[in-house]
Image (cartoon, coloured by chain):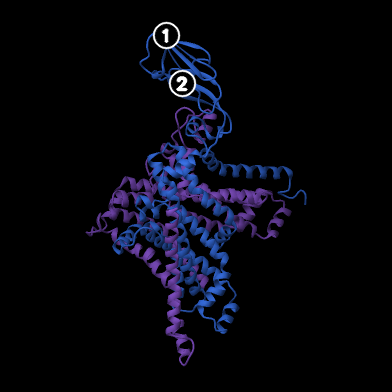
Chain colours: A purple, B blue
């Protein structure tokens, strides 16, 4: 009970303190420059200059501290040694280029980037198309969407149990199925190369629901008459799907694809809890965590972080360009 | 119209069946762990979870206790009961690990040196020897055990393994880490949507750019900055989560607020309402759907986060669920009874939020990604 109380008090202080800032700063502004009296006009102009910054101020400060400063700081550290005391030039990067584990991470990362968005989008599209046409579609959608709510760690436990290999009776579902069809039970997560695929399955399982929700909305937005025209022209359901529907939602597929790509670049939890990068399953984010926190090597760890950042840059550039276009 | 594509009975069946197969495929892994969390430790190892609803053959090991031996005439006798828990009748028994089911119930087996052992169908056994026993004897008993489910695992994990504490820690992280960024983002989004100031366009572009910055970059610089500023514990995690959640929050809320009718806001300004009043009395209530969808995102994300909590809450008494479970997976990888329960304790809150507020979640996803 004491724990609950303590939690409630900390919560109240945190949220209350934040709310207090906005209330207090606005009250001060309105008292110093009241919108009444002899100087009302110039006071209103002054408050109009200052108030936007009271509103965006805390957000800008936090964003600068937690996202902009770290990017610059990490870049700086990636040119420094282990404890960030001496400048070492590009030697962290040349170490990375020569390191076998880094090659493995890069290779796996590209495999993840290829497989996960493709499969998640495919299953999402399939699920959207199937569930849109049946009575219990919304119920089915909820169940496919559900893994979105489960943490990567929780998903890791769920799937590690599916892949479990035990002596005697198989308690892992995959091995039981394999055994049922007469195959040999395997240590799936230690199987070279294929273990990467088994890890990717977990992320596909989580992300397919996201793809389904977005693509389902896009499919419903397709004008009916294009489909009717195709039916009259004698197109079969597969032709309607691939030649009429898919081209019309191509841009939405692109958005889903890039969103999942960003998730893939940051994937850490799944690899960390299921294999911790052993047996040839290392990826960039987990390698970075290992260098930073297990080996306390800030220089090399930061260099890996910068590599992740560089991979994200094209998507960032694309987003900003589109946003600027919209603003005009 | 009856023969239109998609309306043929065979096709309708095919669609229904494929949809059912896909949904089942997606559901089964979770169901497996869910069922496992209600099973006994011995059962989990003995049979797959899909057998949990049927009786299963189980083997349990017993030992005779030489202290209970009695001298009857010229013989020494040990009597007792060896019946696997939950079962009512022995189906087979044995004395060697390699042959745990070698003998039928009621059979008497010669153990050498004139020692005889009988195990009856009701589990009672009798061991008779011409000399005094000085050692215990292993007996393996097999029996048909009916399905049984219990909450034992839950009470054990919640009380004993620190998961109960971790649950409260997770809530302490997630709730303020959801409310604080929403508050900041709502003010910022209003300013970016409806106040005219110079840096506005630039700030919006920066926020869109920050949407995709990997938070991994922030770990070391912020951890060091926190320790030099003396920020620690929950405050540090709240600030970090706020920072990582803000770009999406501002982006979603600004897009929504820009769409609100201009007349309402201008009229209020003409009527002499202060910006603060407009914000609280008009903008916030009207933006409820967007606020709700972002808060669901942020809550799920902070509740489920592993990395930020791991880095910014290093002490044991502030450990959150995901960190505790990740540790259990490392140290107790095979103890599925503990892992299954702990995983479900961590999953249950997000699932409740998900199923009760799914509407808002979907709306937010659509607003956030169809750019």
Q: Residue at x 46, y 93 (%)?
A: A38
- Alpha-carbon span between mark 2 and mark 1: 24 Å
User: Disc 2 sits on a residue from what chain?
Assistant: B
Q: Which mark sits nearer the N-terminus, 2 or 1?
A: 1
The percent position of residue B13, horizontal first and vertical second, equals 70, 42
Does B8 appear above or below B74? below
Q: Nearer the viewer, mark 2 or mark 1?
A: 1
The percent position of residue A126, horizontal first and vertical second, equals 60, 48
Badge 2 and badge 1 both on one subunit: yes
Pointer 2 residue: B140
Q: Is residue B313 visible?
A: yes
User: Disc 1 sits on a residue from what chain?
Assistant: B
The percent position of residue A119, horizontal first and vertical second, equals 52, 48
Q: Residues within 10 Å of mark 1 (few under 14, many from 20)?
A: few
Left-right relation of A301 to A226: left
Q: Residue at x 39, y 18 (%)?
A: B66
**Secondary-structure class at tag 2:** strand
**Secondary-structure class at tag 1:** strand
Pointer 1 residue: B75
Q: Residue at x 45, y 78 (%)?
A: A26
């Amino acid at each position: 009970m004491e724990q609950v109380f303590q939690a409630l008090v900390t919560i109240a202080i945190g949220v209350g303190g934040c709310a207090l800032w906005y209330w207090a700063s606005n009250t001060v502004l309105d008292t110093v420059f009241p919108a009444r009296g002899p100087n009302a006009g110039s006071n209103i102009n002054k408050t109009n200059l200052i108030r936007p910054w009271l509103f965006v101020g805390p957000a800008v400060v936090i964003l600068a501290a937690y996202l902009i400063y770290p990017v610059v700081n990490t870049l700086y550290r990636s040119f420094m040694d282990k404890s960030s005391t001496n400048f070492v030039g590009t030697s962290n990067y040349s170490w990375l280029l020569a390191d076998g584990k880094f090659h493995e991470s890069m290779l796996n990362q590209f495999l993840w980037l290829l497989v996960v968005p493709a499969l998640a989008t495919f299953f999402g599209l399939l699920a959207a198309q199937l569930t849109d046409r049946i009575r219990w579609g919304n119920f089915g959608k909820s169940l496919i969407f559900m893994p979105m709510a489960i943490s990567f760690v929780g998903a890791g436990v769920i799937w590690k149990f599916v892949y479990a290999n035990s002596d005697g009776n198989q308690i892992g579902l995959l091995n039981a199925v394999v055994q049922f069809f007469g195959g040999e039970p395997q240590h799936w997560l230690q199987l070279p190369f294929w273990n990467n695929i088994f890890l990717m399955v977990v992320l596909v399982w989580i992300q397919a629901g996201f793809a389904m929700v977005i693509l389902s909305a896009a499919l419903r937005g397709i004008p009916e008459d294009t489909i009717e025209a195709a039916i009259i022209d004698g197109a079969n359901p597969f032709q309607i799907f691939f030649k009429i529907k898919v081209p019309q939602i191509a841009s939405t597929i692109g958005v889903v694809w890039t969103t999942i790509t960003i998730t893939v670049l940051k994937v850490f939890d799944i690899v960390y809890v299921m294999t911790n990068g052993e047996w040839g399953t290392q990826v960039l984010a987990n390698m970075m965590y290992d260098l930073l926190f297990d080996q306390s090597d800030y220089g090399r760890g930061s260099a890996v972080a910068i590599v992740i950042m560089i991979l994200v840059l094209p998507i960032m550039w694309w987003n900003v360009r589109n946003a600027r276009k919209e603003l005009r | 119209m009856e023969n239109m594509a998609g309306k043929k009975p065979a096709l309708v069946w095919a669609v229904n069946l494929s949809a059912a197969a896909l949904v089942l495929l997606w559901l089964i892994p979770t169901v497996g762990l869910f069922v496992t969390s209600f099973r006994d430790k011995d059962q989990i190892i003995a049979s797959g979870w899909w057998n949990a609803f049927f009786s299963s053959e189980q083997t349990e090991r017993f030992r005779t206790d030489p202290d209970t031996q009695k001298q009857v005439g010229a013989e020494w006798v040990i009597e007792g009961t060896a019946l696997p828990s939950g079962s009512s009748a022995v189906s087979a028994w044995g004395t060697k690990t390699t042959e745990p089911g070698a003998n039928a119930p009621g059979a008497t087996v010669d153990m050498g040196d004139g020692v005889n052992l009988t195990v009856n169908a009701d589990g009672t056994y009798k061991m008779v020897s011409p000399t005094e026993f000085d050692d215990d004897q292993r007996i393996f008993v097999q029996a048909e055990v009916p399905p049984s489910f219990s909450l034992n695992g839950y009470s054990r994990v919640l009380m004993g393994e620190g998961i109960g504490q971790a649950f409260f820690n997770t809530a302490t992280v997630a709730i303020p880490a959801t409310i604080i960024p929403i508050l900041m983002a709502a003010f910022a989004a209003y300013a970016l949507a409806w106040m005219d100031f110079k840096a506005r366009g630039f700030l919006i572009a920066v926020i869109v750019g920050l949407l995709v910055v990997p938070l991994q970059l922030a770990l070391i610089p912020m951890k060091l900055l926190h320790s030099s500023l003396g920020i620690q514990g929950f405050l540090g995690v709240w600030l970090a989560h706020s920072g990582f959640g803000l770009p999406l929050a501002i982006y979603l809320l600004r897009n929504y607020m820009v769409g609100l009718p201009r007349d309402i806001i201008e009229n209020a300004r003409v009527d002499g309402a202060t910006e603060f009043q407009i914000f609280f009395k008009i903008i916030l209530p009207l933006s409820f759907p967007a606020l709700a969808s972002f808060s669901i995102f942020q809550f799920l994300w902070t509740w489920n986060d592993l990395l930020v909590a791991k880095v910014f809450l290093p002490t044991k008494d502030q450990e959150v669920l995901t960190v505790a479970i990740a540790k259990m997976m490392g140290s107790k990888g095979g103890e599925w009874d503990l892992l299954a329960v702990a995983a479900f304790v961590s999953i249950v809150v997000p699932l409740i939020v998900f199923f009760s507020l799914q509407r808002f979640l979907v709306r937010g996803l659509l607003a956030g990604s169809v750019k």
